[in-house]
Structures are given as structure tokens and as C-alpha cells.
Image: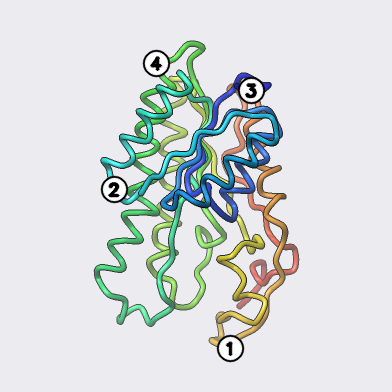
Amino acid sequence: MGASGKFALVTGAGTGVGRAVALSLAKAGYSVALAGRRPEPLAAVAAEVNAAGSQAVAVPTDVSKRDSILALFVKVKSSFGRLDLLFNNAGIGAPPVPLEDLPFETWQNVVATNLTGMFLCTQEAIKIMKAQSPRGGRIINNGSISAHAPRPYSVAYTSTKHAVTGLTKSTSLDCRQYDICAGQIDIGNAATPLTERMVDGVLQANFTKSPEPRMEADHVGNAVVYMASLPLDTNVLFMTVMANKMPFVGRG
């Protein structure tokens, strides 16, 4: 058990933002369940969590599959007995192609992972949190800057991230009665394997390519720890954490 006696679940925990958040939570004393598709990265993060003095449970999970999510939450409940924090982080993108050329199957896969998977994880977390004693908990969704504004050729990712905002608001409203807080962290250009292409250049709103600044993913982990540290009568509904010089605020 972690020093805080609190228990967290992080999806997409094997790399990038998920790994950074899991390690920050571990350093804050949380025991952490790690969910992700690939066992090897999960095992590596679990070893880091253990080295930080907290308990880790690695659960290979495909959040695009309902049965996989149900099995994940059975494992979390049997391992921890309760759940204080869910960080809904798992997500995928699609190849940058014109909107009219995006294959239907690709669209479906992004929606299944980024939106339906997050909804199903939220459902299962609520069931645990409303029934446990002490009651309640916190659900934090990874929204992304794409919850506010698209990049060119990103219709599937952008549409799901806009939908995550609606899921966050609905969860916050529906779950107040159970002492469950729901919030969203919108991340811009964290330095992860998924953003390495930004160093060489990515498409801008005028369809030219330009390099973009990035920030360390650890800052996202620290932000999530702050949100999670609040008492359940207080909530950060939305927070934006971004590389200060990225081209988000302004005209594209």
C-alpha cells in the first residue's frame, strides 16, 4: 500500500503522459494500477512505481474492448478494495489524411478507444466509488488541446476529444450526489514519443509545416497530483497545461 493509503488507476500507463502521471502519483503515496495494451512497458513502469516506495499492479488492458475493461476493474477491486482516483488517459490518433479519405474502420477504432473506452472506465469507477466507505473519489480525463481546437487532418481525434469535454461535464454533474469529482486536464505538447514529430515540424492551420516547442511530461504528472490532492468538496473542472510557446493561443 502507498504511504497515503489511497488507490489510483491510470489507463494508457505504459508510456508518455500515463507513465509520468503514474510515477507522480506513486511519489505522492498512491498505490497505482497500471492499464495499457502492452505488458512490457507496464512492467517497466510498475518497477519504477515500486522503486518509489508504492504498490503497483500492472493489468494489460485494451480499452476499446468492454470485456477487457470489466476485467480491469475486477482486478483493481480485488487488489485494492477501493478506488480513489481514475485517470482516464488512454487514447489513440489516426493517420493525418483529408477528412473525406479517413477509413470508416479507423474512425470507429478511435471512437472506441478515446470516447467509448473512457465512458466505460468512468461507469465502472463510479460503481466502485459510490459504494465504498468512505464514499466518493475523483475522475480526471485527459482532454487535450484538441478538445478546444483541431489540427489539420485530425477529425477523429479532435471529435473524440471534444466529446470528452461533454463526458467530463456530465460526470461532474451526475456524480456530485455520490461525492465523486470529475475534472479534465487539457495537455498541449508534452514531450512524449507521440510528439517527437513536432521537433521536425507538424502541419499548421495554413497547411505549412513548422516545428513546435514541447514541455516535460512530468509537469502534467504534478498537475494531476494537485487536482487529486483537493478535498472532495473542491474540484478543478478544467485545467490547461501546455508548452508556453506552442501555437495555440492566437490566430492560425
Q: Could you tell me residue 235's position as x and y percent?
A: 60, 32
Against 145, residue 79 (above or below) is above
Callout 3 amino acid: Pro
Percent x, y for residue 242? 68, 58
Image quadrant for the C terminus? bottom right
- The residue at the point 54 percent across, 44 percent down is 184
Q: Which colour scheme is used?
A: rainbow
The residue labelled by disc 1 is 208
Q: Residue at x 44, y 15 (%)?
A: 132
Q: For the residue carrying disc 1, how many other residues have a C-alpha within 10 Å: few (<14), some (14-19), or many (20+)?
A: few
Mark whose residue sits in front, 2 or 3: 2
Residue designated by label 2: 65
Distance from the alpha carbon under mark 1 to that under mark 2: 37 Å
Q: How far separated are the C-alphas under marks 4 and 2?
A: 25 Å
Q: Quickly name the residue at label 4.
A: 131
For marks 2 and 3, the one nearer the N-term is: 2
Mark nearest the camera among 1 and 2 is: 2
The mark nearer the N terminus, 3 or 1, is: 1
Q: Which of marks 3 and 4 is nearer the N terminus?
A: 4
- Structural distance between the alpha carbons of marks 3 and 1: 46 Å
Element under label 2?
loop
Question: Along the polypeptide, which appears first: circle 4 or circle 1?
Answer: 4
Between circles 3 and 4, the one closer to the viewer is 4
Comparing marks 4 and 1, which lies closer to the viewer? 4
Q: Is mark 1 on a helix, strand or loop?
A: loop
Q: Position of residue 238 (x, y in %)?
A: 58, 44
